[in-house]
Amino acid sequence: MDYLLIQVTNGAIIGIIYALIAVGVTIIFSILKIVNFAHGDLYMLGGYTAYYIVTFLGVPPLGALFLSMAGLFLFGIVLERLFLTPLYSDRTERKDEYGLIVTFGLAFFLRNTALIVFGPFPLRPPSFVPGVVHVGGLAVTNDRIVAGAVGVLLILALLYFMHRTIWGQALDAVSQSRDSAAIVGINPRRFNSLAFGVGAALAAAASALIAPIYSLSPGMGVLPNIQAYVIVILGGMGSVLGSIVAGILLGEAEGLFTAFFPDPTRALAYTNAFGVLVLMIALILRPTGLFGRRHVRME
Amino acid sequence: MTPAAPAPWLVARDLVAGYLPGISILRGVSVEAVPGQVRCVLGPNGTGKSTLLKALFGFLPPWEGEVEVGGRRVTGLLPHEMRLHGVVYLPQRPSIFPYLSVEVNLRLGAWQYRGHRGRVEELVGRAVERFPILAEKRRQPAGTLSGGQQRQLELARSLMHDPTVFLIDEPTAGIEPRVAAQIYGLIKDLAAHGKAVLLVDQNIKRALEIADYVYVMRTGTVLSEGSRETFGGDTEALVARWLYASGST
C-alpha cells in the first residue's frame, strides 16, 4: 500500500511538471499555430539559468526560479521577434514548414551551445529545502513537495490569468480568431511574443523545479519535449485545462505502469512507451482528446 | 433651398488590390461613406465587393490608390489600428469569439479602455441594455447563439467605441427572413443616428430598401453609381444590368 502511495505521489509531482511544460506548448501552438520543437531546449535553458543564478549570485533556489522565469520570458520574446516574425509576413510562402524548420534548427543550436558552454556532465543545484517528510510509511523529499506545491500554484496563477484577466481573455480570443481580434482593436502580433514568452517562462519554471531532483544536462529537454506533445494531443489541441489534466494523468500513468510492470528490471525502459499507450487508448475513445473543443458552428 | 449633403467621412480613391501578385481583384475602385447614409455595394459574386471592404479596413493592403478617414490618410494601416480612426468592420461570418462567453466578448469589444475597469463595465452595461437578449445569454458561449443573436452581439460590441464608419459585409447571409428584417432595421437605425454605412449585400431587394446610394460593381470596377432614386427603385433593371455585367446574358 505504501509503495502504491509513493508511486501515486511521485506520479502526481512529475505530472505537474509535465503539465507546466505542455501548457507552454499549447499556448504557443494556439497563438502562433506552430509546433515549437525548441520548447524542450528552452526548458533545459531555464534550469541552467536558475542553477547559475544560485551559484554566482547566491540567490536562494526559489528566488532563482522566478528570476529564471523572468529571464526566459524575455529570451522567448527575443527569439520570437528574431526568428518567427516571417511567419506573419505575406511574403513568406510555406509558413508551416518555416516554423517547423526554424524551431527545429533552434533546438539543435541551443542544445549544442549548452553542451559547449555548460559542459556534458550533469549538474545539480542545491535543494529548495533539504530533508525528507515521513507520513506513515510514505517518505517524500522536501524538494518533491516544493516542486509539486509551486507547480500547482503556478498552474493556478496561469488559470487565473487566462480566465480572469483581460489579457488572458484576449490571448484566448487571438487563439480563436486573429482577424476577429484585430477587428476589436487587439494587435494579434503582440500576442505572438506574449505567448512565446509565457511558454518559455513556464518551461523554465518546470526545469528549475525538477533540477534538484533529477539534475541538469544539455540533453534533458528531449524527452519532456516528446512527452509534452503526447500531453497536448491527449488533453486536446489548444486546451490549457486539457494539458494540465493530461499532464497529471500521464505522470500518474507512467508512475503506476512502471511500478506494477511484471518485470521490474525492464519497467523503467518502457516508461515513455506507457505514455504513448495511454495516448492511443484515449484517442480511440475520444479522438478530439480529453478537452478538445467541439466544433461550434459559426452561423 | 436644399440642405447641403454631408461631407464623406471615408473616401477611397482608385483602389487596386489583390491576393496574389499580378492578379488584381480591385481595379481602380473609388467609393465614399457619408454620415447619415447607407451606401450599398451591389454586384454579382466574384466582383470584388468583399475584397473592397477588406482593402478599406486594412486586411488587404492596397497596391495602388488611397483611403482617407476624416481627412487623414489611413492607407496601409493594420486592421487593429482602424478602430482608432472610428472605422468598424462586420465581416460576412460574425467576428465573435465562439468559445468565450457573451460577456467576455463584449468586454473585449472595449479593449481600447482595458486599463479603465469602470469604463469597460459601463460600456458592457450599456450594450446589454440596448440588446436585452445579450443580457439573458450573458454567461453562454457566444458560439451557441443563433445567427441573428451573433450579429447583435457583434453590433453591440462595435458600438462601444462610438464609431463613425461601418463596413458591413453580407449581414444577413444564412439568416432567417424575420431576423434579417430586424438586422436591416438596425443598419438603417445606424444611419439615422449619423453613422456612415457601407454595406455589401447579395440581397438586392432588401439592401435597396434601406440604401441611400448604390454602387454597382463588376469585375473589380464600379460599373455605375448613384442615389437610390437614380435606379428608380427598379430592381429588375438592376438585376438585368448585373447579369449583363457578369456576361450571363
Image (spheres, coloured by chain):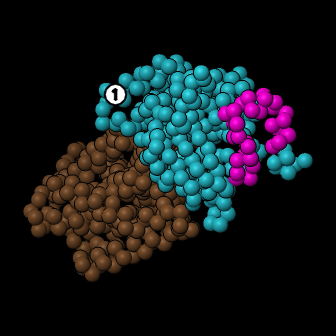
Chain A's shade in the image?
brown
Foreground of the two, A265 or A175: A175
Q: Give the x, y percent position of residue A65.
A: 21, 56
> Is residue A276 shown above or below A184?
below
At a point 73% along the width and 38% down the height, the residue shown is B202
At a point 45% along the width and 30% down the height, the residue shown is B162
Residue annotated with mark 1: B119
A212 relative position to B90: left or right: left
Q: Is residue B223 magenta?
A: yes
Q: Give the x, y percent position of residue A79.
A: 35, 66
Would residue B186 be seen by someone viewing this image from the given angle?
A: no
> Is residue B170 shown above or below B54?
above
Q: Give the x, y percent position of residue A90.
A: 53, 63
Q: Give the x, y percent position of residue B196.
A: 55, 33
Chain B's shade in the image?
cyan
Q: Is residue A297 magenta?
A: no
What chain is tagged by disc 1? B
Would residue A83 be seen by someone viewing this image from the given angle?
A: yes
Callout 1: helix, strand or loop?
helix
Foreground of the two, B159 or B149: B159
Foreground of the two, A263 or A27: A27
At a point 43% along the width and 75% down the height, the residue shown is A105
The extreme left residue here reads: A58
The magenta stretch is B213-242
